[in-house]
Image (spheres, coloured by chain):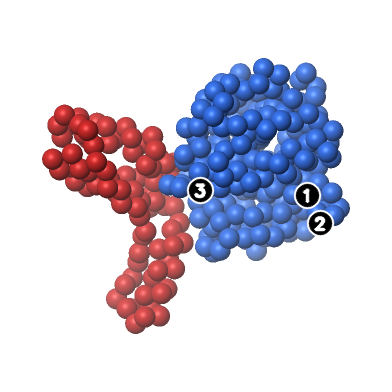
Amino acid sequence: MLAVVQFPGSNDDRDMRFAFKAVLGAEARLVFHKASELPPDTRGVVIPGGFSYGDYLRCGAMAQYSPIMAAVKRFADAGGPVLGVCNGFQVLCESGLLPGALVRNHGLHFICEFVHVRVERAAAPFTSRVAAGDVLRIPIKHGEGCYYAEPGLLDELEQGGQIVLRYCEVDGSVSAAANPNGSVANVAGVRSARGNVMGLMPHPEHAVEPAFGGSDGIAILGSFADAVRSAV
Amino acid sequence: MKALVYVTLKPDVLDPQGKAIVRASAQLGYDAVKAVRQGKLFELELDAADEAAARRLLDEFSDKLLANPVIEDYRVVTIEP
């Protein structure tokens, strides 16, 4: 079972559950942030997008201390797969489960548009359905999506294969023009050193049916659903 | 006790809001404004025995919540009875 965490201000929680249940046929349940434990049959955790706690102080800063996050940390420390999208990515960075931080977009504007991202690493549990070099078209919608890692950390991430997705042109080339928010090295998604926690700013749950404008998000959510099914 | 804690982005983290303020300054004719870094100032009321205890509390609290040490620095500006 996939646990989709709900904070006050989360707004992609139901979209995420829809993507997993209705599109991918996976079992997914909403779990309120005040719970101090994840349901016992939890095999994967998703931290969805939105504006947890109104983005007060910093995006994700308050949510990191919600009761459920202690349980999510224990789950991740035990090797359980955890996926954070947009605000969920910010929460995972704030809580120290992922390296780096997300700051205000380079151009200050809130951006809502489809972008292209290149898969840098194809591996379970997040990108097993794609190959390195594949280009996915997935929307972003954020004001604070500029990924920051200090130079030493960035080298570590590059060498450790922790950069999973990069903003790119339609042909897969990585350019400054394809970088929507000023993220360092065009980073759109990173994983933890151990590989079981990943965060990304694009919203795969908003690209799961042709009527959404595209269905490339299935590549990522489907990989995650596969990993969760095989863990049962 | 009362305290002021000042949080700023680390010098190597880009501050687009500061840059936008500089551009607006120039449009208003304030060419003398050459650079702006935007920060946050927190006014706190504390229950602490003395200044040393207040400082310990503020250091811990700032590290844990007020600032994100990955991107921000903090400074305790004042502690007053």
Q: Colour of chain B?
A: red
x and y percentages locating residue A64 in the rendered image: 50, 34
Q: CA distance from mark 3 to mark 1?
A: 25 Å
Residue A182's tag is none
> Looking at the image, is A3 positioned above or below residue B17?
above
Return the disc, 3 or 2, that comes first in the chain's sequence: 3
Report if the CB atoms under discs 3 and 1 are less than 8 Å apart. Answer: no
Q: Which chain is blue?
A: A
Report if the CB atoms under discs 1 and 2 are less than 8 Å apart. Answer: yes
Return the disc, 1 or 2, that comes first in the chain's sequence: 1
Query: Mark 3 falls on what kind of element?
Result: helix
Query: Mark 2 falls on what kind of element?
Result: loop
| Residue B44 relative to residue A210: left or right | left
Query: Residue tagged by mark 3?
Result: A54
Query: Mark 1 falls on what kind of element?
Result: loop
Q: Nearer the viewer, residue A15 or B25?
A: A15
The chain holding disc 3 is: A
Residue A207's tag is 1
Query: Residue tagged by mark 2?
Result: A213
Residue type at mark 3 is Gly
The chain holding disc 2 is: A
| Residue A213 relative to residue B35: left or right | right
Residue type at mark 1 is Ala
